[in-house]
Image (spheres, grey):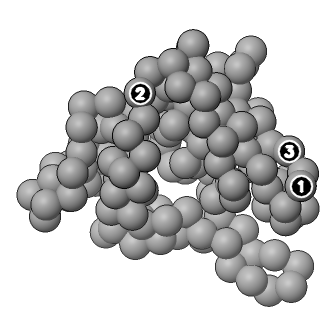
Amino acid sequence: MSMSELLERLEAAGIPLDDLTKSAMIDIDPSDFTDFDLEGFWHDKPIPFLFTGFGATRTISAPHMIATLLHHLEITIGQDIMLIGSKGGYLAAIIDRMVGKDGTVTILEPHDEVRLHTEERVREAPMLRSNQASTTKRC
């Protein structure tokens, strides 16, 4: 399944998706932020990106939750956005694409394992801008 097909299904189910959100979600590949199977994601379910040393599962939210959050944030090109909690970097990458080269995304991530995972994935993500890519900071 493709992201375009998933977004069509979400729209048919009544999830609000504007063109900027759709474009960003199509551009950013969730597989860049997890090593786990994406099958559940394509069926609108959260997927793990990390199992912590304490046995907790950290997930990328279900696509309908991401789309709903982005709708309510009312993101526009050029904004400077701060995220508290990285969700593995996937959400930050989408927002980074939405705000464009004149905007910024800063992540505050207090959990060391999640922060390290996010830093690695954001650094390696081919779609992020290298000079202003999303950054993580420890609280």
Q: Which residue is mark 2?
A: 76
Q: CA distance from mark 1 to mark 3?
A: 6 Å
Q: In the visual, does 69 lie left or right of 87?
A: left
- Give the alpha-carbon distance from disc 1 to disc 2, as whole Å: 26 Å
- Residue position marked by numbered label 3 in the rendering: 137
Crowding near pointer 2: few (<14 within 10 Å), some, many (20+)?
Answer: some
Figure quadrant of residue 81: top right
Q: Residue at x 21, y 58 (%)?
A: 15
Left or right: where does residue 25 sit relative to residue 36?
left
Is residue 39 among the parts visible in the rendering? Answer: no
Which residue appears farthest toward the bottom when viewing the image? 55
Asked if 99 appears above or below 91 in the picture, the reply is: above
Find out whether the residues at labels 1 and 3 contact each other: C-beta distance under 8 Å. Answer: yes
- Amino acid identity at mark 2: Thr
| Image position, residue 17 (x, y; %) | 24, 45
SS label for mark 1: loop
The CA span between labels 2 and 3 is 23 Å
What residue is shown with label 1? 139
Q: Badges 1 and 2: C-beta atoms under 8 Å apart?
A: no
Q: Nearer the viewer, mark 2 or mark 3?
A: 2
Of the image marks 1 and 2, the number of the one nearer the N terminus = 2
Q: Nearer the viewer, residue 71 or 36?
A: 71
Helix, strand or loop at disc 2?
loop
**Number of residues whose C-alpha sits closer than 10 Å to that of mark 1, classed few (under 14), some (14–19) or many (20 or more):** few
What numbered label is drawn on residue 51? none
Is there CB contact under 8 Å for labels 2 and 3? no
Q: Residues within 10 Å of mark 3 (few under 14, many from 20)?
A: few
Give whichever of discs 2 and 3 has the lower sequence position: 2
Picture quarter containing residue 57? bottom right
x 49%, y 65%: residue: 61
